[in-house]
Amino acid sequence: MSSNKNELSNIPITYRKMENLHIVFWLFKDIAWCMGWRPLGVIMIIPTIIISIIIAWRTRKIVSELCHNVAITVWISANSFWMCSEFFGIDNHIVLGNITVKQLAMIPFVTGVLILAYYYLIYKPRHKEEEATL
């Protein structure tokens, strides 16, 4: 733990390369969604989520990084679910009451928000001395 609060956290180059590759996969997934390229979009879910999980696992010892990376993982999950619901034409099917299949993506979206709310509102204020990247 550093005594200098202004010191930046160093992220190993192998982690940074994986994060950069993750962005490439994520962009291809979303471009495929935008363009209606179903096979590419669905295939790109796999590496995007796997790398997201690996990044979260590798950063598990830094709570700030872990919370943000898990929030990203559930965001990608929600985004992928929404994309698939549109690709397979079930996005507007009613599940319960007025809730559609697409709106079920709110479950992981809200989960991500709750993870970050926990970090910023509960964990971070109680651990001010702890190393954080944000």
Image (spheres, helix red, strand yellow):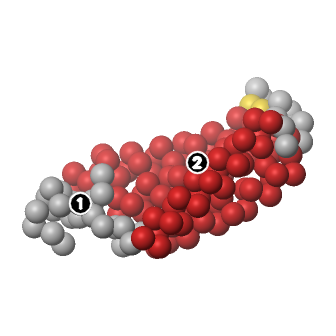
Looking at the picture, tell me which residue is in the foreground, 31 or 101: 31
Task: Pick whichever of labels 2 and 1 is earlier in the sequence.
Answer: 1
Q: Position of residue 16 (x, y in %)?
A: 45, 65
- Work out which residue is located at the far left of the displayed protein and give it: 3
Q: Position of residue 84 (x, y in %)?
A: 80, 45
Q: CA distance from mark 2 to mark 1?
A: 26 Å
- Please give the residue where the numbered disc 1 appears in the rendered image: 8
- The residue indicated by pointer 2 is 75
Indicate the amino acid at tag 2. Trp
How packed mark 2 is, by other alpha carbons closer than 10 Å (few <14, some 14-19, many 20 or more), is: many
Q: Disc 2 vs disc 1: which is toward the camera? A: 1
Secondary structure type for disc 1: loop
**Where residue 95 sits: x, y (%)?**
81, 37
Quarter that holds the N terminus: bottom left
Identify the mark at residue 132; answer none if there is no mark: none
Quarter location, residue 12: bottom left
Label 1: few (<14), some or many (≥20) within 10 Å? few
**Residue 48 appears left or right of 125:** right
User: Element type at marker 2?
Assistant: helix
Q: Residue 76's spot in the image, x, y percent?
A: 62, 50
Examine the rendering and report whether any part of residue 95 can be seen. no
Q: Residue at x 23, y 64 (%)?
A: 131
The residue drawn where x is 48% and y is 43% is 113
Whether 55 is drawn above or below 67: the answer is: below
Amino acid carrying mark 1 in the image: Leu
Q: Residue at x 83, y 30 (%)?
A: 92
